[in-house]
Amino acid sequence: MTGTAPFIVSASGIRGVVGSTMTPEVSARYGAAFGRYLVQVGATDDLETYVIVGRDSRTSGELLSAAAAAGLRAAGVSVRDAGIAPTPTLLLAVRDDVSAVGGLVLTASHNPIEWNGLKLASGSGMFVSPEAGLAIQELFEAVPELADWSRLGCGDTLDGVAEHHIERILSLPLLDVDSIRDRAPVVALDCVHGAGGAVMPELLRRLGCRVEGIGLATDGVFPRDPEPIPANLGELRRLVQASGAEIGMAVDPDGDRLALVDGAGEPVGEDWTLALAAEYVLERRKGAVVTNLSSSQSIEQAAVRAGVPFHRAPVGEARVAERMIATEAVIGGEGNGGVMLPELNLTRDAAVAAALVLALLATRETTLADLLAPRDRYHMVKRKVGRGELDPEDIYRRMRAVISEGAEENTEDGLRLTWPEAQEWLHVRPSGTEPILRIIAEAPGLERAEELVRMASRSMSA
């Protein structure tokens, strides 16, 4: 690829800077690679099949989505365009549509506004496996073969995916909708002008909530850094305090991550989203819990309290989904606020996460702050380091030499060192979405978590 801006090609999709490394030509070629792959594996042998294409609200989305759809059709695969919708909404549409053999989502998730990317799903409504992703990547890099004039795919629209998502959540047998409606909580909501605005406000209203919202328009003009981390939630915190909301909720641009703010306007940390959702589900369904190697111990504690198995998987939705299937997990996800409920779909879903958290508070007749007050709270510190010419394996060797004494090692995804008795861990891994190395540490004390991150950083420059 040309251009000096970042461009990431991985088994989970592609991502780049619009107008530089992410262009209509790139989008069309990747769409064609996905289409060619589906033709090769026989997914499109039935002429009535199609791929559902959708996008988050980024201003570049419509253009790049049209290009990706053109690439699919040029490879001989028909397309149904669902327009702007959260990623989990689109993947649920794929899962529940017997004619859908895949999904293609235009999104750069939490990345800044200048980014966009493409994610691919199989007909099961799950992101494609790493093996399939690598095969598609090879087709993309080799320039995929296209269909002739007689085998081009057709194009059409697909309406109603947001309503379908809302109805499916409301009809979940384990969700105590009446308890939420009886409580009628005031919820402050920040959708950061992303695709979450197409689902979240209406879902909350139909759960009986009074919604005080900011950033609900789906115009893609993000007023702040769109990642829903505490540093970016100042306006939501003020809205909670001004409106008297019981809880604040923030989603990322494609609506698969949910961050929580308590009634005092204090962010509680994204990992608590999955921990609380798991707590609610495990009261009603006994089974394993799965999360990734970079997620908080608070999630593990929910499984321990319920007396169920707990498993960690490499970072990435597809990897977590694979482990959930293998362990027959009843809930899982990632500690960035991504909840995966297999009863609905095996993808991160902010909307179902919001419903589960509200149901927990309603059935317990408590507030978020009061629920968390007696819980063990850990401090997590995260740092990004430009990857440049750094060799991750060399970094891991240095870390083992200076940090790893007494630690348990996991090398499934980078290097994770755990000191169980001290309730501390450190994880260093290459990012799959940015050209960086991620350093994440967690400990009961903030100073210790910061020290672990500093030790890892020093090993990179030694």
Image: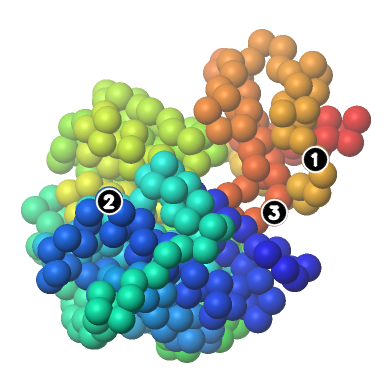
Point out which mark residue 390 bears.
1
Q: Position of residue 143 (x, y in %)?
A: 52, 63
Could you classify mark 2 by the number of other residues whose Cα lies within 10 Å: few (under 14), some (14-19), or many (20 or more)? few
- Kindly report the distance in space between the C-alpha atoms of the residues bearing marks 2 and 3: 31 Å
Out of 435 and 74, give the one closest to the viewer: 74
Q: In this rendering, would 35 be left or right of 451? A: left
* Mark 2 / mark 3, whichever is N-terminal: 2
* Mark 3 / mark 1, whichever is N-terminal: 1
Out of 456 and 301, give the one closest to the viewer: 456
Q: Quadrant of the C terminus?
A: top right
- Which residue is drawn at the image coordinates 65% and 42% (left, top)? 430
- Which residue is drawn at the image coordinates 25% and 75% (left, top)? 151
* Mark 2 / mark 1, whichever is N-terminal: 2
- Which residue is drawn at the image coordinates 31% and 65% (left, top)? 103
Up-down: is 85 above or below 343?
below
Up-down: is 169 above or below 156?
above
Whether residue 315 is visible here, answered yes or no, is yes
Mark 2 residue type:
Val
- Kindly report the distance in space between the C-alpha atoms of the residues bearing marks 3 and 1: 11 Å
Mark 1 residue type:
Leu
Q: Position of residue 404 (x, y in %)?
A: 71, 17
Q: Which residue is mark 3?
A: 435
